[in-house]
Image (spheres, rainbow, N blue to C red):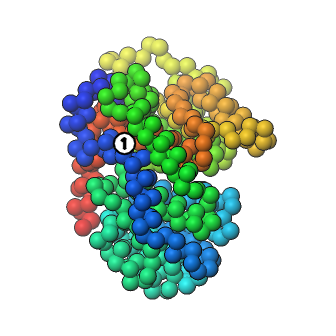
Amino acid sequence: MVYVDEALLDDEAHLAACDSRQTVRAFATAGAQVREALTLSAEADMERLTRGDRPRSVLVASLGGSAVVADVLGMLAEPGSPVPVTTRRNVPLPGWVGPLDLVVAVSLSGRARGPLAVAAEAARRGASLLTVGASDSPLAAISARARGVHVDVGSGRVSSRTALWSLLTPVLVGADALGLVDVPESALREAAARLDAEAEACRPSSEAFVNPAKLLALGLGGTVPVVLGDGPLSGVAAARAAAMLTRTARVPATHGELPDAASQIVATFDGPFTAGGGQGVDTPAVADIFADPFLDGPSMPRLSLLMLRDAPVDPTRPEEADVAALTDAVLATAEDAGVRISTVVAEPGPPIARLAGQMARVDFAATYLAIGAGLDPARSRHLLHLRDQTR
């Protein structure tokens, strides 16, 4: 497990030396990414998507660090989209995709095999195309040949994880124009402001005792984290959080969404990673006060629960009250089991702004978790080895 040295989090020289690709700084540009992507979307003539009939369906191809783009679009479209929105990571395309459908392919470099193959096959079938990626890429070339709409991601983007909002914003602009989601430009600009606020609060020069992302990293350090969202919006944020913890902080993390995941998450509280865990149903969760880490060896890593809570929209609605009660019950059960608990609560606002704040907080925390353990958040020796072996 990753054990965090608090002194390292406040050592700006260490932060700069350990962060070879300036990951913290890249996350701090998220708000600027939204504003630049709005400009680039306008320059790409996104309105071309609306000049014909509304598509029969929308299929989104994104993977890896950009996979959350499809998750966000699907979550926002589900309540009111007049057409189905589906996700595909690679070919083959479903047999029903044809000239009446819209295919969205997202790749920062424009060279990822999955989205590239999906876009090429969609173009061959005559489907409409919306692509997001580098302007001088094979993906852009496929879109141009198919007379699709291609949106550039701008310059200086080195990772799909840190360039999320350059990839996501054009897709939301297009989906809003088609009436699939309700994400007007004003909501995206509010999300940009929320991202700017998180960047300011989580800046490297802010000391750990007041920096919310550093505090979250310290709470997660030395634990096996379980990330739980209290609904569809925070469920998407939970999936992003688990991906960031595993890929950036090198911590194995799982995630779930209430209410469905309640039982499987709470069941882990009986396991070996909690105080007194694994001792039977009727045995109280009591840590061994006589355990000596120097004589007995290091103890097992503890389980931690990272609870992502959405801002209440209408507390008087029965379904919201039920989820809030279930969330409180899960937290109480975790506390009784000796699970370390961290909570991130979204601030009120449009759905995309609430989501932006939650994701930004955990993005910074995962990066600080890596740096506080002496790890480079952008470079993994074993990942580089895997790439060498699979070329």
- The crowding category of the residue bearing disc 1, from other C-alpha atoms within 10 Å (few below 14, some 14 to 19, many at least 20), is many
The structure residue drawn at horizontal position 43% and vertical position 83%, both measured from the top left corner, is: 146
The structure residue drawn at horizontal position 51% and vertical position 46%, both measured from the top left corner, is: 191
Q: The C terminus is located in which quarter? A: bottom left
Q: 329 or 320, which is in the foreground? A: 320
The image shows residue 84, relative to residue 244, as above or below, that is below
Amino acid identity at mark 1: Ala
Q: Is residue 207 visible?
A: yes
The image shows residue 193, relative to residue 127, as above or below, that is above
The structure residue drawn at horizontal position 67% and vertical position 31%, both measured from the top left corner, is: 328
Q: Secondary structure at mark 1?
A: helix
Residue 201: percent from left, percent from top: 42, 31
The image shows residue 370, relative to residue 60, as above or below, that is above
Q: Quadrant of residue 266?
A: top right
> To which residue does mark 1 refer?
28
Asked if residue 259 lies left or right of residue 41, the reply is right
Q: 214 or 128, which is in the foreground? A: 128
Tally of numbered discs: 1
Q: The N terminus is located in which quarter? A: top left
The structure residue drawn at horizontal position 67% and vertical position 45%, both measured from the top left corner, is: 259
Residue 326: percent from left, percent from top: 70, 36
Q: 78 or 340, which is in the foreground? A: 78
Q: Quadrant of residue 157?
A: bottom left
Residue 243: percent from left, percent from top: 44, 49
Q: Residue furthest top?
A: 290
Q: Quadrant of residue 331?
A: top right
Q: Is residue 274 visible?
A: no
